[in-house]
Protein backbone atom coordinates (compact mmCIF):
# COMPACT_ATOMS: atom_id res chain seq x y z
CA UNK A 1 0.00 0.00 0.00
CA UNK A 2 1.39 3.45 -0.88
CA UNK A 3 1.80 6.05 1.86
CA UNK A 4 -1.25 8.29 2.21
CA UNK A 5 -0.23 11.95 1.84
CA UNK A 6 -1.99 15.05 3.08
CA UNK A 7 -1.02 18.59 2.05
CA UNK A 8 -1.67 21.63 4.23
CA UNK A 9 -1.68 24.93 2.33
CA UNK A 10 -2.54 24.35 -1.32
CA UNK A 11 -2.12 27.88 -2.62
CA UNK A 12 -1.92 28.98 -6.22
CA UNK A 13 0.86 28.04 -8.64
CA UNK A 14 3.75 30.50 -8.84
CA UNK A 15 2.96 33.65 -10.90
CA UNK A 16 -0.66 32.54 -11.49
CA UNK A 17 -3.69 34.72 -10.73
CA UNK A 18 -4.14 35.10 -7.00
CA UNK A 19 -0.74 33.63 -6.10
CA UNK A 20 0.80 35.01 -2.89
CA UNK A 21 4.01 32.96 -2.93
CA UNK A 22 5.91 30.35 -4.89
CA UNK A 23 3.18 27.72 -4.83
CA UNK A 24 5.58 25.21 -3.28
CA UNK A 25 2.78 22.76 -2.52
CA UNK A 26 2.47 22.13 -6.25
CA UNK A 27 6.11 21.06 -6.39
CA UNK A 28 5.67 18.86 -3.33
CA UNK A 29 2.77 17.26 -5.18
CA UNK A 30 4.90 16.55 -8.25
CA UNK A 31 7.30 14.64 -6.01
CA UNK A 32 4.59 12.53 -4.46
CA UNK A 33 3.04 11.85 -7.87
CA UNK A 34 6.43 10.69 -9.16
CA UNK A 35 6.85 8.22 -6.30
CA UNK A 36 5.40 4.71 -6.65
CA UNK A 37 5.21 4.60 -2.84
CA UNK A 38 2.95 7.63 -2.24
CA UNK A 39 -0.53 8.87 -3.12
CA UNK A 40 -2.11 12.24 -2.41
CA UNK A 41 -5.14 11.44 -0.28
CA UNK A 42 -6.27 14.69 1.34
CA UNK A 43 -5.90 18.47 1.06
CA UNK A 44 -6.38 21.23 3.60
CA UNK A 45 -6.64 24.94 2.87
CA UNK A 46 -8.63 27.69 4.57
CA UNK A 47 -9.65 28.70 1.02
CA UNK A 48 -11.46 25.67 -0.39
CA UNK A 49 -11.33 27.18 -3.89
CA UNK A 50 -7.54 26.80 -3.71
CA UNK A 51 -7.97 23.20 -2.57
CA UNK A 52 -10.40 22.43 -5.40
CA UNK A 53 -8.07 23.94 -7.98
CA UNK A 54 -5.18 21.94 -6.52
CA UNK A 55 -7.29 18.77 -6.58
CA UNK A 56 -8.00 19.24 -10.29
CA UNK A 57 -4.27 19.37 -11.02
CA UNK A 58 -2.86 16.83 -8.58
CA UNK A 59 -5.66 14.70 -7.12
CA UNK A 60 -6.61 14.16 -3.50
CA UNK A 61 -9.92 12.56 -2.55
CA UNK A 62 -10.88 14.63 0.46
CA UNK A 63 -10.84 18.41 1.00
CA UNK A 64 -10.79 20.19 4.36
CA UNK A 65 -10.93 23.83 5.40
CA UNK A 66 -9.51 22.83 8.81
CA UNK A 67 -6.19 20.99 8.82
CA UNK A 68 -6.91 19.62 12.31
CA UNK A 69 -10.00 17.89 10.94
CA UNK A 70 -7.90 16.42 8.12
CA UNK A 71 -5.36 15.06 10.61
CA UNK A 72 -8.16 13.51 12.68
CA UNK A 73 -10.10 11.90 9.83
CA UNK A 74 -7.86 11.18 6.81
CA UNK A 75 -5.60 8.38 8.21
CA UNK A 76 -2.45 9.97 6.80
CA UNK A 77 1.11 8.63 6.73
CA UNK A 78 2.88 11.76 5.40
CA UNK A 79 1.95 15.44 5.71
CA UNK A 80 3.43 18.29 3.67
CA UNK A 81 3.16 21.74 5.24
CA UNK A 82 3.30 24.61 2.75
CA UNK A 83 2.18 27.60 4.81
CA UNK A 84 3.81 30.78 6.12
CA UNK A 85 6.51 30.31 8.78
CA UNK A 86 4.45 31.44 11.79
CA UNK A 87 2.18 28.40 11.26
CA UNK A 88 4.91 25.79 10.86
CA UNK A 89 5.46 24.82 14.49
CA UNK A 90 1.81 24.35 15.44
CA UNK A 91 1.14 22.33 12.28
CA UNK A 92 4.25 20.13 12.51
CA UNK A 93 3.54 19.38 16.17
CA UNK A 94 -0.14 18.67 15.50
CA UNK A 95 0.75 16.26 12.70
CA UNK A 96 3.30 14.44 14.86
CA UNK A 97 0.82 14.14 17.73
CA UNK A 98 -1.85 12.88 15.29
CA UNK A 99 0.30 9.84 14.53
CA UNK A 100 1.66 10.43 11.03
CA UNK A 101 4.92 8.74 10.03
CA UNK A 102 6.59 11.73 8.34
CA UNK A 103 6.24 15.50 8.03
CA UNK A 104 7.78 17.59 5.24
CA UNK A 105 7.73 21.34 5.87
CA UNK A 106 8.68 24.46 3.97
CA UNK A 107 11.53 26.71 5.13
CA UNK A 108 12.49 28.77 7.06
CA UNK A 109 11.72 26.58 10.04
CA UNK A 110 10.00 29.12 12.33
CA UNK A 111 10.00 32.79 13.45
CA UNK A 112 11.70 31.88 16.77
CA UNK A 113 14.46 29.45 17.70
CA UNK A 114 12.35 27.88 20.45
CA UNK A 115 9.66 26.87 17.95
CA UNK A 116 12.29 25.36 15.65
CA UNK A 117 13.73 23.28 18.49
CA UNK A 118 10.29 22.09 19.63
CA UNK A 119 9.39 20.81 16.16
CA UNK A 120 12.47 18.59 16.13
CA UNK A 121 12.01 17.51 19.76
CA UNK A 122 8.34 16.55 19.36
CA UNK A 123 8.92 14.63 16.13
CA UNK A 124 11.82 12.73 17.68
CA UNK A 125 9.70 11.91 20.74
CA UNK A 126 6.93 10.50 18.53
CA UNK A 127 9.24 8.68 16.12
CA UNK A 128 8.19 10.92 13.22
CA UNK A 129 10.55 11.57 10.30
CA UNK A 130 10.84 15.36 9.93
CA UNK A 131 12.26 17.14 6.88
CA UNK A 132 12.50 20.73 5.65
CA UNK A 133 12.69 21.87 2.05
CA UNK A 134 16.35 22.83 1.63
CA UNK A 135 16.15 21.61 -1.94
CA UNK A 136 19.52 22.96 -3.11
CA UNK A 137 21.15 19.84 -1.67
CA UNK A 138 19.90 18.21 -4.88
CA UNK A 139 21.25 20.86 -7.29
CA UNK A 140 23.95 19.62 -9.71
CA UNK A 141 26.34 22.54 -9.14
CA UNK A 142 26.22 22.11 -5.35
CA UNK A 143 26.76 18.36 -5.51
CA UNK A 144 29.55 18.77 -8.06
CA UNK A 145 31.23 21.36 -5.82
CA UNK A 146 31.20 18.94 -2.90
CA UNK A 147 32.54 16.14 -5.12
CA UNK A 148 35.38 18.37 -6.31
CA UNK A 149 36.21 19.26 -2.71
CA UNK A 150 36.22 15.61 -1.65
CA UNK A 151 38.43 14.71 -4.61
CA UNK A 152 41.14 17.06 -3.30
CA UNK A 153 40.82 19.46 -6.24
CA UNK A 154 41.40 22.53 -4.03
CA UNK A 155 43.44 20.90 -1.28
CA UNK A 156 42.44 21.19 2.36
CA UNK A 157 39.19 23.10 2.98
CA UNK A 158 39.88 26.29 4.92
CA UNK A 159 36.88 28.60 4.55
CA UNK A 160 33.28 28.55 3.32
CA UNK A 161 31.40 31.66 2.22
CA UNK A 162 27.82 32.55 1.32
CA UNK A 163 26.29 35.74 -0.08
CA UNK A 164 22.52 36.33 -0.28
CA UNK A 165 19.77 38.89 0.52
CA UNK A 166 19.04 37.95 4.14
CA UNK A 167 19.89 35.52 6.92
CA UNK A 168 16.55 33.82 7.45
CA UNK A 169 14.53 33.34 4.26
CA UNK A 170 17.52 33.05 1.90
CA UNK A 171 20.31 32.45 4.38
CA UNK A 172 18.70 29.28 5.69
CA UNK A 173 19.58 27.70 2.32
CA UNK A 174 23.18 28.92 2.36
CA UNK A 175 23.89 28.00 5.98
CA UNK A 176 22.50 24.56 5.14
CA UNK A 177 24.68 24.26 2.03
CA UNK A 178 27.83 25.16 3.96
CA UNK A 179 27.09 22.27 6.33
CA UNK A 180 26.50 20.11 3.24
CA UNK A 181 29.98 20.88 1.87
CA UNK A 182 31.65 20.40 5.26
CA UNK A 183 30.19 16.94 5.93
CA UNK A 184 27.64 18.23 8.47
CA UNK A 185 30.42 19.24 10.89
CA UNK A 186 28.97 21.22 13.85
CA UNK A 187 29.82 24.88 14.54
CA UNK A 188 31.25 25.73 17.97
CA UNK A 189 31.18 29.57 17.93
CA UNK A 190 29.84 32.49 15.93
CA UNK A 191 30.11 36.27 15.98
CA UNK A 192 27.80 38.47 13.94
CA UNK A 193 26.11 41.80 13.41
CA UNK A 194 22.95 43.02 11.71
CA UNK A 195 21.58 46.42 10.64
CA UNK A 196 17.87 46.94 9.98
CA UNK A 197 18.15 49.86 7.56
CA UNK A 198 16.31 48.89 4.36
CA UNK A 199 15.11 45.71 6.05
CA UNK A 200 12.17 43.77 4.71
CA UNK A 201 9.48 41.28 5.66
CA UNK A 202 9.13 37.97 3.84
CA UNK A 203 6.03 35.83 4.52
CA UNK A 204 5.44 37.75 7.72
CA UNK A 205 8.95 37.40 9.15
CA UNK A 206 11.16 40.53 9.49
CA UNK A 207 14.64 40.50 7.95
CA UNK A 208 17.72 42.62 8.38
CA UNK A 209 18.81 45.08 5.71
CA UNK A 210 22.41 43.98 6.06
CA UNK A 211 24.14 41.22 8.00
CA UNK A 212 27.48 39.62 8.67
CA UNK A 213 28.05 36.24 10.29
CA UNK A 214 31.50 34.73 11.00
CA UNK A 215 31.72 31.26 12.52
CA UNK A 216 34.04 28.35 13.30
CA UNK A 217 33.41 24.68 12.63
CA UNK A 218 34.71 22.02 14.99
CA UNK A 219 37.12 20.77 12.30
CA UNK A 220 38.81 24.19 12.07
CA UNK A 221 37.08 25.41 8.89
CA UNK A 222 35.83 29.01 9.04
CA UNK A 223 32.50 30.23 7.69
CA UNK A 224 31.39 33.65 6.48
CA UNK A 225 27.87 34.80 5.52
CA UNK A 226 27.26 38.26 4.00
CA UNK A 227 23.72 39.51 3.43
CA UNK A 228 21.84 42.51 2.12
CA UNK A 229 23.39 45.84 1.14
CA UNK A 230 26.38 45.33 -1.15
CA UNK A 231 25.48 41.71 -1.86
CA UNK A 232 23.01 42.42 -4.68
CA UNK A 233 23.48 40.11 -7.66
CA UNK A 234 26.24 38.13 -5.95
CA UNK A 235 24.19 35.21 -4.62
CA UNK A 236 26.39 32.15 -4.29
CA UNK A 237 28.91 30.13 -2.32
CA UNK A 238 32.70 29.85 -2.23
CA UNK A 239 34.74 26.90 -1.05
CA UNK A 240 38.28 28.09 -0.35
CA UNK A 241 41.03 25.53 0.07
CA UNK A 242 44.79 25.44 0.50
CA UNK A 243 45.24 24.88 -3.25
CA UNK A 244 42.33 26.67 -4.90
CA UNK A 245 38.77 27.96 -4.81
CA UNK A 246 35.40 26.68 -6.03
CA UNK A 247 32.68 29.23 -6.81
CA UNK A 248 29.03 28.15 -6.96
CA UNK A 249 26.27 30.37 -8.36
CA UNK A 250 22.50 30.06 -8.52
CA UNK A 251 22.31 31.08 -12.18
CA UNK A 252 22.16 28.61 -15.04
CA UNK A 253 24.91 30.50 -16.81
CA UNK A 254 28.34 29.63 -15.46
CA UNK A 255 26.99 28.00 -12.25
CA UNK A 256 30.29 26.38 -11.21
CA UNK A 257 33.88 27.60 -11.59
CA UNK A 258 37.15 26.52 -10.06
CA UNK A 259 40.60 28.01 -9.60
CA UNK A 260 43.02 25.17 -8.89
CA UNK A 261 46.72 25.36 -8.12
CA UNK A 262 48.56 26.65 -11.20
CA UNK A 263 45.44 28.03 -12.94
CA UNK A 264 45.82 31.56 -14.28
CA UNK A 265 42.10 31.87 -15.04
CA UNK A 266 38.96 30.34 -13.53
CA UNK A 267 37.83 27.14 -15.20
CA UNK A 268 34.12 26.53 -15.87
CA UNK A 269 32.89 23.09 -14.82
CA UNK A 270 30.44 21.52 -17.26
CA UNK A 271 27.10 20.49 -15.74
CA UNK A 272 23.65 19.34 -16.76
CA UNK A 273 21.59 22.39 -15.68
CA UNK A 274 18.40 21.56 -17.59
CA UNK A 275 16.39 21.15 -14.39
CA UNK A 276 15.49 24.10 -12.15
CA UNK A 277 15.71 24.47 -8.39
CA UNK A 278 11.95 23.92 -8.24
CA UNK A 279 12.35 20.43 -9.69
CA UNK A 280 14.91 19.77 -6.94
CA UNK A 281 11.92 20.11 -4.58
CA UNK A 282 10.55 17.01 -6.27
CA UNK A 283 13.87 15.24 -5.67
CA UNK A 284 13.63 16.06 -1.98
CA UNK A 285 10.15 14.57 -1.75
CA UNK A 286 11.25 11.41 -3.55
CA UNK A 287 14.16 11.11 -1.12
CA UNK A 288 12.04 11.54 2.01
CA UNK A 289 9.55 8.90 0.82
CA UNK A 290 12.39 6.48 0.07
CA UNK A 291 14.01 7.24 3.44
CA UNK A 292 10.75 6.47 5.22
CA UNK A 293 10.38 3.22 3.30
CA UNK A 294 13.92 2.06 4.10
CA UNK A 295 14.24 3.52 7.63
CA UNK A 296 17.23 5.74 6.81
CA UNK A 297 17.95 9.38 7.48
CA UNK A 298 16.65 11.64 4.67
CA UNK A 299 18.92 14.21 3.05
CA UNK A 300 16.67 17.03 4.29
CA UNK A 301 16.51 15.80 7.89
CA UNK A 302 15.09 18.14 10.51
CA UNK A 303 18.21 18.02 12.69
CA UNK A 304 20.23 19.35 9.74
CA UNK A 305 17.77 22.18 9.18
CA UNK A 306 17.96 22.99 12.90
CA UNK A 307 21.74 23.47 12.71
CA UNK A 308 21.31 25.99 9.88
CA UNK A 309 18.54 27.72 11.85
CA UNK A 310 20.79 27.88 14.93
CA UNK A 311 23.29 29.95 12.92
CA UNK A 312 20.55 32.40 11.91
CA UNK A 313 19.40 33.01 15.45
CA UNK A 314 22.95 32.95 16.83
CA UNK A 315 23.79 35.84 14.49
CA UNK A 316 20.83 37.80 15.80
CA UNK A 317 21.81 36.93 19.38
CA UNK A 318 25.42 37.98 18.81
CA UNK A 319 24.13 41.34 17.59
CA UNK A 320 21.89 41.63 20.66
CA UNK A 321 24.62 40.69 23.16
CA UNK A 322 27.43 42.45 21.27
CA UNK A 323 29.43 39.31 21.89
CA UNK A 324 30.58 36.00 20.47
CA UNK A 325 28.09 33.15 20.84
CA UNK A 326 29.34 29.75 21.96
CA UNK A 327 27.21 26.76 20.99
CA UNK A 328 24.75 25.32 21.74
CA UNK A 329 22.57 28.40 21.47
CA UNK A 330 20.58 28.87 24.68
CA UNK A 331 17.65 31.09 23.67
CA UNK A 332 13.97 30.55 22.82
CA UNK A 333 12.97 33.82 21.15
CA UNK A 334 13.98 35.73 18.03
CA UNK A 335 16.52 38.35 19.12
CA UNK A 336 15.81 40.31 15.95
CA UNK A 337 12.09 40.59 16.72
CA UNK A 338 12.84 41.39 20.37
CA UNK A 339 15.20 44.20 19.39
CA UNK A 340 12.65 45.60 16.97
CA UNK A 341 9.98 45.61 19.68
CA UNK A 342 12.36 47.38 22.03
CA UNK A 343 13.36 49.89 19.37
CA UNK A 344 17.01 48.74 19.39
CA UNK A 345 17.07 46.86 16.10
CA UNK A 346 18.56 49.72 14.10
Image: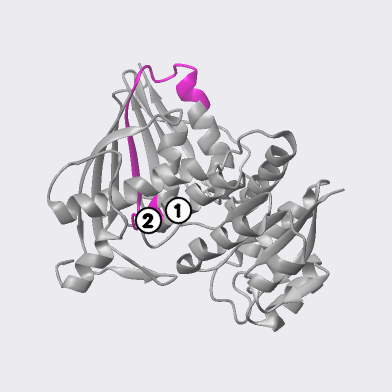
Q: Nearer the viewer, residue 272 or 127?
A: 127
Q: Residues within 10 Å of mark 2 (few under 14, many from 20)?
A: some
Name the spot of residue 67 as percent of width and height, x first: 65, 71
68 magenta-colored: no
**Crowding at mark 1 (Cα within 10 Å: few <14, some 14-19, many 20+):** some
| Percent x, y of residue 238 | 37, 36
- In the picture as drawn, the residue positioned furthest to the left comes out as 322
Residue 327 falls left or right of residue 95: left
Residue denoted by label 2: 114
Image point (66%, 44%), residue name: 288
Residue 29 on image: x %, y %: 72, 59
Residue 335 falls left or right of residue 124? left
Identify the element where label 1 is drawn.
Answer: helix
Q: How is the image coloured?
A: one colour
At 49% from the left and 53% from the top, the residue drawn is: 119
267 vs 51, left or right, is: left
Magenta segment boundaries in residue numbering? 147-171
Image quadrant in which the C terminus is located: bottom left
Viewer-side residue, 34 vs 334 = 334
User: Toward which corner of the image does residue 112 lie, by quadrant?
Assistant: bottom left
Q: Residue at x 15, y 72 (%)?
A: 343
Q: Secondary structure at mark 2?
A: helix
Residue in the foreground of this view, choosing between 288 and 254: 288
Q: Relative to residue 334, is residue 328 depicted above or below?
A: above
Residue indicated by mark 1: 118
Say whether marks 2 and 1 touch (CB < 8 Å): yes
- Residue extending farthest right: 1
Amino acid sequence: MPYRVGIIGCGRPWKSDGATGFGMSHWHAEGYKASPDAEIAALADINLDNARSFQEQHGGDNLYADYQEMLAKASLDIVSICTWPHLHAEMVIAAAEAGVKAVHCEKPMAPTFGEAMRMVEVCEAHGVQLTFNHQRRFGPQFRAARDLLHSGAIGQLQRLEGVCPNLCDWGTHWFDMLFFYNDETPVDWLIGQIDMRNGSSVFGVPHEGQGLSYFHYQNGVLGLMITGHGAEGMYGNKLIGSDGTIEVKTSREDPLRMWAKGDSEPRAIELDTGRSDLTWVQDGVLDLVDALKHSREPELAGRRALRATELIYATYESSRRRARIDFPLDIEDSPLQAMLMQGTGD
